[in-house]
């Protein structure tokens, strides 16, 4: 500072010179700049909070946006002379589509304009006619033609991408998984009037209905020879007993495990073909009301559930489920009302649990089964749709209508699997016995149904913080009462920072100790922990009672407000006693071991890393926070209030309860709120001290998974901007909002309290 | 009698006193637990030789360090399928670190006290700390050079120590060459590649430049060849020597000296020797790189990463925190705005740290980092430079997280500066900014320091957000090295807290890693508690000083 005086101009020159004016102005300018900078800096704190909130919202927001479909082009079907369309499909990049015709031809055309790119024809023998057609799943690209001589021809459309000079070139082609020539399906050579196909790497299944109403199952397995590359096909034929029922729809799943047969009237039969020599009828049921007809039946992606469309525009989802008694049955999971007209075509998405549905009036809709959402509803001109297809990425569709034109639409539908119901309500997932709350976000396979219910996570969060508060509130508040009001100032100045330092301990260390030291310890001494709960308060009480009969000359050596120090040995003794006695108690009351006793008596399972461990560890972590704020509130209760109360004859305890606690209660409330907010958001302790299993179980001996731990576990693996990523952001937003409310409330209460104190 | 006693309220006061006691016991117990376990890690324990015979197998010899003893109640033991020989109340089990993972399959073994025939601590038992496969316990038989025995019996130990010294210095030289010199060449080659790509993108890549680049590349490659040759030669020398040792079962094993970090015979050491060894172990622990998926060796990169990240964070957080506090105390009119700001500060302090991690990952890494990459590093695409978690983003995220700590502490300091000082300055004609800069802030600097220390302590222990924005379990290079621009803000780093989580919970060999985790925890706790106490002391001194000023 001293050097600055030397740089200042001498007093005489301050009076009126241009230089001093300039200097003055410069100083004032600096002052102004400083003011603006500081003001901006101060306000930027608000900005930071708002930024966090809006950024989280910005990432979550696309989940709420509706899906869109846009008509791009409409063009006439090319190469009409090659026959009528029986099947449409598109490739990955939405550049090329293929049209299979009823004469066994494949026409590859540009998706955008319908121009023919290539044509190919299947090797249909001269003497045979095509009598039936089926596809083996949109994702496989397999199609099957059934012929009038009891044979069938299988083809597959595939696309090769090459990059020449930095440009992508896609070349379509046909391949023949079971050979270029037709394979025999029915030994007696009857015409195949219906056909279904499932092609695997090694084994394939063809299912056909013959003209004389038999249902023939032909299984093929590839046997590769040791000596050359040629693989030979081995065929196995068997019959399905239909009991004379008519069969109009047939499906074989990709595992080649189940066969589904249905007739128009809605009778559904499921056969187990795991043993392909002996198909077994497993279920038989009726899927429709009287008077309705099945008009369409396909698999949902993954081949685990059936989608059945009926003549009244209702789409239903059916799946095989297993209940608790290991009993299997076919259940209707949900239904969608598409329109009043019959559903004529369904095209499932290839990577998600959604589908495109078209009805006879040309209405199309896109639905998602998990979220039970209708995402898109549009009308396509041109009358009744004949063939529809969704692109592999489900971002485009083609619809060929009665009038011979193909409509090309693009679809913007990034997050169909999220709805209020799928996040917060029970959802009946495929293969599950009943609707349930489940969090299981990802798996390696495309067929996986993501289960993103936030309920188990919120439940786990509340459960963990509830037990933590159960531990923390009594210890912290009692401690605060004593420290803030009764304790001698000489020890208070060490005790308070001592407990507060506990709050500075990294939670990763508490979590590590909880997981690797406390959890095994509790497992060994479970009954000891519960004994501790009784023994320690009892021990303190007994000691206090005995203390008043200790001769006064000893008793008075302990100054007032030092009681907590002589209690320490008592508590340590009680703790040691509880742990040492635990094997005895186990042997006496619990047949030797509390854990096995609980399990055999009440069926309560025991996880090593459970809620009890979390509650203790996290309780420990929030004690300092609650203690510190509550202690401040109690300590700063104006002294004239307490002295007044004491002067009027109240005991110290009465003064405490009736005066101090009442006055400080808003502060205590805000302490608890802030502690609760901390417990809800705590990550590392929960991550390390529980098994992170997202179960909804009230038992304190079971693990849990909290919102925060879930983010920590799954965020690094989540693909940016995927639904999973946004749902994780949503859980962060939930945490943010929750703590925001709690903290704001606590702070407002505290500010009011401060004003009250200053006026007292 | 009891009734009146209850009525007096005194039992309840005792209960509240008990709560304080419990809290204090918990704190002390926790610190004690970490200290005992953490400090014990470095003590060279005796190696015991057990003659052990249980029901299933014939008598075997087990050599190892006893690490833990557990008592199992008789009933529990029976439930677990053990039998008690002499109707004892407890089943006593010892956990023995037998080492020799390559031979025995695991490092640890539980043995039951009742089956131990005899145990002793012979002087000649040897502990070999290896670079792979953990410790080896056994006896030293001979030292070999190129497969020929050069020393055995009594002599072997001294020769082994001598040879090990030279082997270690060789090893360190190789290590240095590989890390520093080869690392630098690789780094420069990569920079060359990026430069070339950048020129290509700008269409400035032509014959002249290409020749220049080719020359440079060639020079680097030549340099690399020379280094490789030196390394090869060193490796030749290193391979010559090996120790012939026998394990508990009597099997003889050759351990090349190149694979050995340290040999010791703890049973022969005096207390003084052990103490020296203890200190040496501790120094090695904080100065060496980790080995074997972090479960052995030191934690130097983690300490380094933590310190660097925390320092960077301090650079970011201090100006913002101080400005915000100055605004709240000196500029803002106390009213709605300040109330809202205080609520915002409180919320910043209360928002779960994982939410900061999510925000940091989404906003800093993907949005800011992604755009920086697009603007300034198009040549690196598709590999991200700043568009991936790294040091810069981690320290920014933590700066945001610790901002309230600095604000609160600074504000407290400002509020304690007597009004008279400001008024005096203003009365002498200073502007508000000058008053602030020349008198108020210098006086508040210890308070700012306090806030900063508390923020650093908080940041050093925070793990959850870092898991998302830049911490990794094993960073190949330090974020600070001899390659231009020396401080690599885009690199990922290691962190003490994450190290604890990772080694304690993600490593395949938790049992072996546990002492190391305790030691790491102890270090972290010491740093954090130390920082906190330091901050509290500064604050208390400050309060005293101001109290004196006010009077």
Image (cartoon, rainbow, N blue to C red):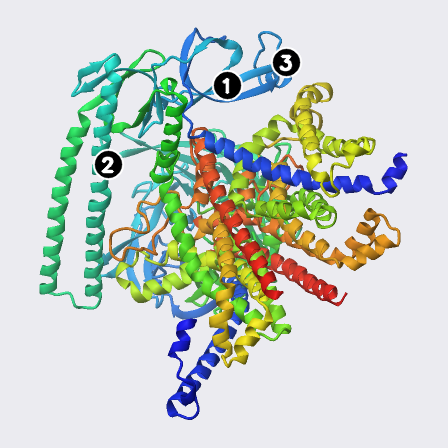
Q: Nearer the viewer, residue A613 or A509?
A: A509
B184 left or right of B353?
left
Q: In which quadrant will I find the N terminus of chain A? A: bottom left
In whole angstroms, how far apart are the C-alphas of marks 3 and 1?
Answer: 16 Å
Q: First in sequence: mark 2 or mark 1?
A: 1
Identify the element where label 3 is drawn.
loop
Q: Residue B225: percent from the left, percent from the top?
A: 12, 43
Q: In which quadrant will I find the C terminus of chain A? A: bottom right
Q: Residue B140: percent from the left, percent from the top?
A: 29, 16
Q: Quadrant of residue B150?
A: top left
Give the mark toward the camera: 2 or 1: 2
- The answer for which chain carries disc 1 is B
Q: Nearer the viewer, residue A151 or A229?
A: A229
B520 left or right of B289?
right
Q: First in sequence: mark 3 or mark 2?
A: 3
Residues at marks 3 and 2 on the same chain: yes
Q: Which residue is mark 1?
A: B94
- The answer, for residue A654, to whether it is visible in the render is yes
In whole angstroms, how far apart are the C-alphas of marks 3 and 2?
Answer: 54 Å
Identify the element where label 1 is drawn.
strand
Q: Nearer the viewer, residue A725 or A678?
A: A678
Residue at point 75%, 56% (across, down): A665
Q: Which residue is mark 2?
A: B172
Q: Quadrant of residue A13?
A: bottom left
B470 left or right of A744?
left
In whole angstroms, how far apart are the C-alphas of marks 2 and 1?
Answer: 38 Å
- Compared with residue A707, is residue B143 higher up or lower down, i.e. above or below? above
Q: Which residue is mark 3?
A: B89
Q: Nearer the viewer, residue A189 or B283?
A: B283
Q: Residue B81: percent from the left, percent from the top?
A: 57, 16
- The answer for which chain carries disc 3 is B
Identify the element where label 2 is drawn.
helix
């Amino acid at each position: 500072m001293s050097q600055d005086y030397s740089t200042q101009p001498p007093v005489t020159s301050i009076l009126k010179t241009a230089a001093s004016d300039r200097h003055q102005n410069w100083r004032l300018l600096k002052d102004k700049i400083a003011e603006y900078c500081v003001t901006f800096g101060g306000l930027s704190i608000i900005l930071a909070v708002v930024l966090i909130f809006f950024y989280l919202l910005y990432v979550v927001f696309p989940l709420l946006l509706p899906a869109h479909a846009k008509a791009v082009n409409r063009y006439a079907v090319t190469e009409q002379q090659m026959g009528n369309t029986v099947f449409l499909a598109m490739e990955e990049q939405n550049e090329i589509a293929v049209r299979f015709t009823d004469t066994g031809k494949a026409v590859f055309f540009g998706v955008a304009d319908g121009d023919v790119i290539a044509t190919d024809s299947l090797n249909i023998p001269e003497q045979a006619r095509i009598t039936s057609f089926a596809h083996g799943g949109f994702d496989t690209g397999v199609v099957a033609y059934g012929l009038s001589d009891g044979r069938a021809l299988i083809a597959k459309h595939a696309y090769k991408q090459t990059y020449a000079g930095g440009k992508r070139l896609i070349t379509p082609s046909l391949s023949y998984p079971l050979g270029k020539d037709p394979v025999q399906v029915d030994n007696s050579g009857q015409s195949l009037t219906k056909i279904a196909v499932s092609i695997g790497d090694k084994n394939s299944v063809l299912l056909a209905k013959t003209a004389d109403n038999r249902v023939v199952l032909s299984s093929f397995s590839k046997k590769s020879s040791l000596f050359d590359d040629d693989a030979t096909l081995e065929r196995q034929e068997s019959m399905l007993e239909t009991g004379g029922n008519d069969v109009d729809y047939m499906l074989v799943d990709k595992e080649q495990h189940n066969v589904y047969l249905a007739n128009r009237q809605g009778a559904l039969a499921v056969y187990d073909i795991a043993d392909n020599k002996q198909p077994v009828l497993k279920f038989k049921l009726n899927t429709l009301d009287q008077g309705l007809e099945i008009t369409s039946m396909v698999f949902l992606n993954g081949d685990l559930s059936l989608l059945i469309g009926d003549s009244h525009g209702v789409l239903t989802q059916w799946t095989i489920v297993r209940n608790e008694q290991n009993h299997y049955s076919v259940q209707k999971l949900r239904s969608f009302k598409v329109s009043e007209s019959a559903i004529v075509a369904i095209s499932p998405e290839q990577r998600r649990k959604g589908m495109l549905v078209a009805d006879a009036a040309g209405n199309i809709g896109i639905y998602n089964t998990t979220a039970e959402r209708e995402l898109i509803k549009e009308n396509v001109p041109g009358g009744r749709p004949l063939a529809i297809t969704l692109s592999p990425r489900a971002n485009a569709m083609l619809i060929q209508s009665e009038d011979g034109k193909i409509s090309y639409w693009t679809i913007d539908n990034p997050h169909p699997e999220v709805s209020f119901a799928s996040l917060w309500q029970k959802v009946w997932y495929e293969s599950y016995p009943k609707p349930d709350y489940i969090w299981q976000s990802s798996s390696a396979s495309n067929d996986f149904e993501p289960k993103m219910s936030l309920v188990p996570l919120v439940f786990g969060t509340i459960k963990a913080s509830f037990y933590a508060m159960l531990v923390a509130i009594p210890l912290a508040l009692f401690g605060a009462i004593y420290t803030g009001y009764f304790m001698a100032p000489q020890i208070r100045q060490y005790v308070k920072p001592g407990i507060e330092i506990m709050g500075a301990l990294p939670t990763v260390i508490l979590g590590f100790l909880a997981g690797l030291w406390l959890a095994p310890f509790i497992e060994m001494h479970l009954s000891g922990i519960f004994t501790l709960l009784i023994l320690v308060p009892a021990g303190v009480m007994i000691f206090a009672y005995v203390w008043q009969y200790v001769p006064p000359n000893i008793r008075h050596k302990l100054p007032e407000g030092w009681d907590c120090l002589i209690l320490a040995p008592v508590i340590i003794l009680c703790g040691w006693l509880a742990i040492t006695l635990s094997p005895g108690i186990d042997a006496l009351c619990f047949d030797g071991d509390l854990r096995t006793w609980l399990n055999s008596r009440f069926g309560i399972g025991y996880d090593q890393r459970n809620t009890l461990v979390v509650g203790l560890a996290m309780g420990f972590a929030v004690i300092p926070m609650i203690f510190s704020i509550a202690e401040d509130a109690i300590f700063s209760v104006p002294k004239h209030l307490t002295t007044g109360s004491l002067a009027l004859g109240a005991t110290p305890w009465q003064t405490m309860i009736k005066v101090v606690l009442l006055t400080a209660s808003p502060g205590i409330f805000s302490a608890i709120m802030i502690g609760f907010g901390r417990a809800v958001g705590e990550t590392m302790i929960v991550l390390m001290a529980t098994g992170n299993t997202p179960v909804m179980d009230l038992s304190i001996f079971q693990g849990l998974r909290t919102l925060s731990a879930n983010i920590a576990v799954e965020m690094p693996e989540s693909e940016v901007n995927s639904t999973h990523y946004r749902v994780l952001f949503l859980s962060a937003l939930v945490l943010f909002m929750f703590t925001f409310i709690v903290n704001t409330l606590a702070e407002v209460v505290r500010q009011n309290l401060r004003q009250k104190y200053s006026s007292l | 009698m009891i009734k009146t006693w209850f009525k007096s309220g005194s039992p309840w006061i005792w209960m509240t006193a008990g709560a304080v006691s419990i809290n204090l016991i918990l704190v002390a117990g926790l610190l004690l637990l970490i200290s005992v376990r953490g400090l014990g890690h470095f003590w060279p324990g005796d190696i015991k030789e057990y003659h052990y015979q249980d029901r299933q197998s014939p008598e075997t010899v087990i050599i190892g360090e006893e690490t833990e003893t557990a008592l199992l109640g008789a009933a529990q033991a029976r439930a677990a399928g053990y039998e008690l020989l002499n109707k004892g109340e407890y089943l006593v089990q010892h956990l023995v670190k037998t080492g020799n993972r390559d031979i025995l399959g695991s490092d640890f073994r539980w043995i039951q006290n009742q089956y131990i025939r005899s145990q002793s601590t012979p002087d000649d038992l040897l502990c070999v700390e290896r670079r792979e496969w953990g410790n080896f316990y056994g006896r030293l038989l001979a030292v070999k050079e190129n497969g020929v025995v050069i020393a055995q019996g009594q002599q072997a130990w001294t020769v082994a120590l001598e040879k090990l010294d030279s082997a270690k210095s060789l090893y360190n030289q190789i290590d240095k060459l590989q890390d520093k010199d080869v690392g630098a060449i690789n780094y420069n080659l990569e920079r060359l590649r990026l430069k070339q790509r950048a020129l290509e993108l700008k269409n400035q890549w032509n014959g002249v430049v290409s020749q220049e680049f080719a020359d440079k590349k060639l020079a680097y490659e030549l340099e690399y060849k020379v280094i490789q040759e030196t390394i090869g030669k060193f490796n030749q020398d290193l391979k010559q020597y090996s120790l012939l040792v026998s394990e508990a079962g009597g099997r003889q094993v050759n351990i090349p000296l190149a694979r050995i970090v340290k040999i010791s015979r703890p049973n022969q050491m005096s207390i003084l020797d052990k103490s020296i060894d203890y200190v040496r172990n501790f120094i090695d622990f904080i100065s060496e790189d980790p080995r074997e998926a972090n479960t052995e060796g030191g934690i130097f990169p983690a300490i380094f990463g933590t310190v660097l990240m925390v320092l960077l964070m301090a650079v970011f957080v201090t100006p913002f925190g101080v400005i915000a506090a100055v605004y709240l105390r000196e500029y803002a009119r106390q009213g709605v705005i300040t109330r809202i700001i205080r609520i915002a500060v409180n919320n910043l302090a209360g928002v779960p740290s994982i939410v900061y991690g999510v925000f940091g990952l989404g906003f800093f890494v993907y949005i800011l980092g992604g755009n920086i990459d697009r603007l300034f590093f198009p040549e690196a695409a598709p590999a991200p430079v700043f568009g991936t978690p790294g040091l810069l983003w981690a320290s920014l995220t933590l700066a945001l997280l610790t901002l309230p700590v600095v604000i609160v502490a600074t504000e407290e300091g400002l509020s304690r500066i007597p009004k008279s000082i400001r008024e005096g300055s203003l009365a002498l004609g200073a502007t508000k900014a000058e008053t602030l800069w020349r008198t108020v802030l210098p006086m508040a600097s210890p308070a700012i320091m306090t806030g900063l220390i508390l923020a650093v302590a908080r940041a050093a222990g925070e793990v959850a957000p870092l898991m998302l924005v830049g911490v990794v379990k094993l960073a190949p290079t330090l974020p600070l090295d001899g390659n231009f621009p020396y401080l690599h803000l885009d690199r990922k780093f290691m962190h003490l807290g994450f190290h604890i989580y990772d080694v304690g919970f993600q490593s395949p060999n938790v049992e072996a890693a546990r002492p190391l985790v305790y030691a790491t925890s102890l270090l972290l706790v010491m740093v954090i508690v130390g920082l906190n106490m330091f901050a509290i002391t500064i604050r208390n001194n400050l309060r005293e000083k101001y109290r004196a000023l006010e009077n």
